[in-house]
Image (cartoon, helix red, strand yellow):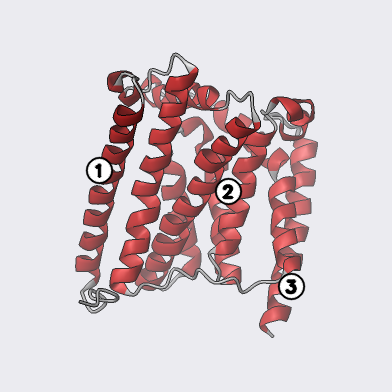
Amino acid sequence: MRLKGIFKDKSSTAKLGILFCLIVLSAFLHSLLAYFGIYLFTDLPLSEVSLMQLSSPALIDAGKFVQLLSAIGLFVTPILLYSYLCNFDLKLKYNFNRQTLLLAIAIMLLINPFIAFIYEWNMSFNLPDYLLFYDKKAEELTLLFLQMDTVADLAFNLLVLAIVPAIGEELLFRGYLQQTFTKWLGKPHVAIVITAVLFSAIHMQFQGFIPRFALGLLLGYLFYWSGSLWLPIIAHFINNAIAILFVYPSFTKYAYLTDNTATWQEAFFSFMAVGLLIVLLQKNLSIKKG
């Protein structure tokens, strides 16, 4: 029985229901697989792992393993299955040149002072305690995950916190949601904004909502301008990988390059430099298309 495109002629509502079912089922099965693997190959208490009470290096590694499979189950597997069953084009094509790639990487490197500045501004908001609870929990878990002593720890963190999130989140937000909203609304810029809002909101870290929304906008436009999902995936990976690399002991002396503080002058220079690179990137993409 040929399953490829079997649901391609279904209504938009039916397809949305199919995607929802795939996400729920995939998330459940991947989580089940993660805990079964921990139960089978370790003596760690599953109750502590499930509650993320990570009081030892072994428990921290188990938590990372659960995070890895959960992210794959929530973002990667269901979207790829949906694409296959509904014949949905995720735009996973490498149709840009090396100059475009280098410009996108440079943008992600130079945007940090601007993001740091608006992050500080976002932090100054007087948010209710029940919202800050999620920020605190996320920060505590991130600090635990970023404890690295060996190259293997660094590689595992890059996989769990950079590679899989970059691929998975871009598949869902830019690959599926942005394209779907564009089709429904007929307004690509509105679709980019809505997708960026959802992208930031799903992280449940409200003190970083605005900077993550700004990054979502940038990733959305990288996808819109290039027509390739690989460009925002690579840019997303660079953004996450930088934060991980400068926590690794061998690179901590360079951590000032990604300091979460910035003056308005640094933020202004960052914004203008990124704007110039974006113009160059658009021009480069236009030349290639021409």
Q: Amino acid at mark 1?
A: Phe
The residue indicated by pointer 3 is 284
Q: Residue furthest top?
A: 55
Question: How many numbered marks are there?
Answer: 3
The extreme bottom residue here reads: 290
**Residue under the point 62% across and 54% down:** 235
Residue 14: % across, % down: 19, 67
**Which is nearer the N-term, disc 2 or disc 3?**
2
Distance from Cα at disc 2 to Cα at disc 3: 21 Å
**Residue 198 badge:** none
Quarter of the picture containing the C terminus is bottom right
The disc at residue 28 is 1
Residue toward you, 283 or 289: 289
Badge 3 element: helix
Which circle's residue, 1 or 2, is located before the other in the chain? 1
Instruction: State the residue position of label 2.
Output: 215
Amino acid of disc 2: Leu
